Image: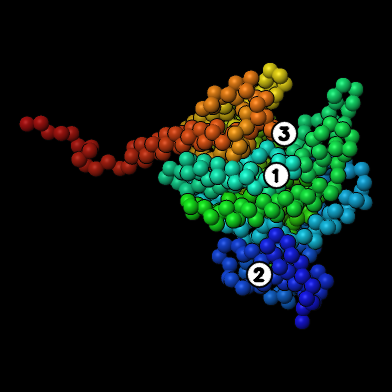
Amino acid sequence: MFNESRLRTGGFRVSRGPSSNELISNDCHRGSGSTPGAKAVFNLDHDVITGDSIAAADAASTPRRRSPGSGADAWHPQSWKAHPIRQAPEYPDADAHARVIAQLRQLPPLVLADEVRALKAQLARVAHGEALLLQGGDCAESFAEFSASSLRDTHRTLREMAIALSTHLPVVTVGRIAGQFAKPRSSAAEKIGDVELPSYRGDIVNGPAFDAQSRAPDPQRMLRAYQQSAITLNLLRALDGASIARQSRLYTSHEALLLPYEAASTHRDSVSGDWYDCSAHLLWIGDRTRQLGGAHLEFCRGIANPLGLKCGPSMTPDELLRVLDVLDPRREPGRITLISRMGADGVRDQLPALVRALQREGRPAVWICDPMHGNTQTATGGYKTRPFERVAEEVRGYFEVHRALGSHAGGLHLEMTGKNVTECTGGPQQLSEQDLPLRYQTHCDPRLNAVQALALAAVARSELASSQAANTDKARRELPQSPAETEPLLVT
């Protein structure tokens, strides 16, 4: 008999099982294709709820499986600690940090293994040229600006963008949402006048206000980030269910930057034996943390989630292939999404070598374009901005490269919002640098507003149409000609 004590959180109702670290849920949120009423078992330390029928005894005896990354059996959610790490905040109270991590490990997963597997299957279609990927959302989510109306606006804009992008191919939509709280910084400290404080690293680490109390890394913020992510996911699932368009669900993603939080969110699937980072469906590795032998690659190689990899101007073909050997030794379609961020001036020169390297190796991967990070400028008045035309030009260059090389241009990765902010200049509203102070609300980098985001989707749609026409012409040229087409006409 089970004890009657129950935990309630984020739509889960969970009963404590006969052992102290085992939970059995009869009515948790199910993944796609699951059987209603099926029991799911997970271990409070690591096991993750799945949508399959599992017996408690089977969960306890599941053998350890080989992890998705290279090397395999030596991997563990904490094995990254033996590797050099970059972009790691220094918490002043180590004991308080340890207590929060212990609490996070006891909390239910935010996403389910079934959902992650469903996304990977859809991304495999993108890799094969049978679908497109749209990934977008805030540069960094905020505690202060969190609201249902803001979430609805972003959800609606992403859906409208997906419709605008959709030509002859379905669109897989992934938000930078429900977890995008941590941000890498170019410097560990910020100095204003004679005062130097730790840099703002996102609301999950510290606060944006320039004072000692706000800038001190606070582990309690990780718990708040988890709570806000759970609320966000509940609303997104409700909005997906109410969508008139009946598109596929909106999946979640964020940068796998704050590794203590990610490791605490990593659980063992009691059916497959694979490890999943259950803080999001897709995690990506940033341009500043993709070092071979580094902690971030070590962590990400062992989780079964789809992985994104930012590819900036410093990425060489050899380095890219070596990183992929670590992250995707099985060459699994849907596992890797490569996010190019070259800038409008560099995309036509720097991207082709990376695309050719994958083509030579026969590696399956999704290619998408991040036209934001390589086109950041400082406007008059000190505001960071991104000119819309520069952003659009990188998108055009990205499509031109893939078209020329016969590669599938898989989609876009954007920092955007559904709100009418004034952070990027240009676009249909013809925003100038003088307009930036009107509604400059970002906590980090400038975002496209809803009108600009939809306009960029229209640019991409036009490029997709050109690619489709080019592919059609090529197919016609390669078709064997009939005798009527090859024999000369006899004129009498």
Q: Nearer the viewer, mark 2 or mark 1?
A: 1
Looking at the picture, how far across and down is residue 93, in whole percent? 92, 46
Looking at the picture, how far across and down is residue 36, in whole percent? 59, 71
Q: Amino acid at mark 3?
A: Cys
Looking at the picture, does residue 390 appear above or below residue 61? above
Using the image, tell me which numbered label, if any, was put on residue 173: none
Taking the view exactly as shown, the residue that stands out farthest to the bottom is: 1
Q: Residue at x 53, y 45 (%)?
A: 159
| Apparent side of residue 471 relative to residue 236 in the rendered image (left or right) | left
Distance of mark 3 from mark 1, alpha carbons? 15 Å
Can you identify the residue that label 3 sits on? 444
Q: Residue at x 78, y 44 (%)?
A: 204
Q: Nearer the viewer, residue 382 or 283?
A: 382
Looking at the picture, how far across and down is residue 329, in whole percent? 65, 51
* Mark closest to the chain's N terminus, 2 or 1: 2
Q: Amino acid at mark 2?
A: Asp
Q: Is residue 436 visible?
A: yes
Q: Nearer the viewer, mark 3 or mark 1?
A: 1
Distance of mark 3 from mark 2, alpha carbons? 39 Å
**In the rendered image, which quarter is residue 360 located in?**
top right
**In the rendered image, which quarter is residue 453 located in?**
top right
Q: Nearer the viewer, residue 349 or 468?
A: 468
Can you identify the residue that label 1 sits on? 146
Q: Residue at x 60, y 21 (%)?
A: 432
Which type of secondary structure does the marked residue at label 2 adopt? loop
Which type of secondary structure does the marked residue at label 1 adopt? loop
Using the image, tell me which numbered label, if any, was put on residue 27: 2
* Mark closest to the chain's N terminus, 3 or 1: 1
